[in-house]
Amino acid sequence: MRVLVTGGSGYIGSHTCVQLLQNGHDVIILDNLCNSKRSVLPVIERLGGKHPTFVEGDIRNEALMTEILHDHAIDTVIHFAGLKAVGESVQKPLEYYDNNVNGTLRLISAMRAANVKNFIFSSSATVYGDQPKIPYVESFPTGTPQKPLWQKQIDGGTDPHRPAKSPAGLEHCPAALLQPGWRASVGRYGRRSARHSE
């Protein structure tokens, strides 16, 4: 299988790439390196036992996405290229919205154009808000994210988040855009602590 891993040189993406390579898959990594380093690529190759293809680029570049999907005959996309720092997202909501929402929409549009129908979307356990019970389960209600500071000043405290802007709403957005015959899954990650023993 030929897999495009967006954000593949980041923490979760790099571990996923290693596992894919170890299982014999061809991996194409797309990353703009805003949250990772190129130096992880030789480590992915060494641990994975196989060379991944690396393309430096951004998911918001739909033409590039379409080109990669066509040129590499991609079977599946695993999407890790979302920005994720909660504190920074409150300080820079427009940048996060542009990358995480618009970037995901452009990626899905490119997938449609290239007829790639297998999609794994990386989400977060933060969609559940602060739950007193651990482990989280799928039936938990989704929470509302922390309000951006600029919105607190404007509205005096009412909730600014519409479903498309909340993490839970964003999570449902890709599913609503998929066509019949597509296979999609959402992974929600909590705290991460595992690492390779090197």
Image (cartoon, grey):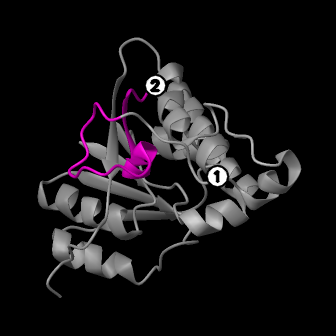
Q: Is residue 133 magenta?
A: yes
Where does the image place residue 172, in percent across and percent down from the top left? Answer: 48, 29
**Compared with residue 155, is residue 8 higher up or lower down, i.e. above or below?**
below
Q: Quadrant of the N terminus?
A: top left
Q: Which residue is mark 2?
A: 175
Q: Furthest residue to the bottom? A: 198
Q: If you read the primary sequence from the N terminus, does the residue marked by circle 2 or circle 1 appear first?
A: 1
Which of the 4 image quarters holds residue 106?
top right
Q: Quadrant of the C terminus?
A: bottom left
Decide if residue 55 is on the left or right side of residue 26.
right
Disc 2 packing (10 Å; few <14; some 14–19; many ≥20) = some
Residue occupying the point 14% across, 54% down? 24
Residue 116: mark in rendering: none
Of residues 30 and 119, which is closer to you in this image? 119
Residues rendered magenta in the picture: 115-140
Residue 99: mark in rendering: 1
Where does the image place residue 12, in percent across and percent down from the top left? Answer: 33, 63
Residue occupying the point 36% across, 79% down? 40
Disc 1 packing (10 Å; few <14; some 14–19; many ≥20) = some
Three-letter amino acid code of the residue under disc 1: Asn
The answer to whether one can see residue 95 in this image is yes
- Tell me the distance, in whole angstroms, between the alpha carbons under discs 2 and 1: 18 Å
The answer to whether one can see residue 114 in this image is no
Count of residue discs: 2
**Compared with residue 195, is residue 5 higher up or lower down, i.e. above or below?**
above
Where does the image place residue 58, in percent across and percent down from the top left? Answer: 61, 57
Three-letter amino acid code of the residue under disc 2: Ala
Which of the 4 image quarters holds residue 163?
top right
Residue occupying the point 62% across, 42% down? 101
Residue occupying the point 87% across, 50% down? 154
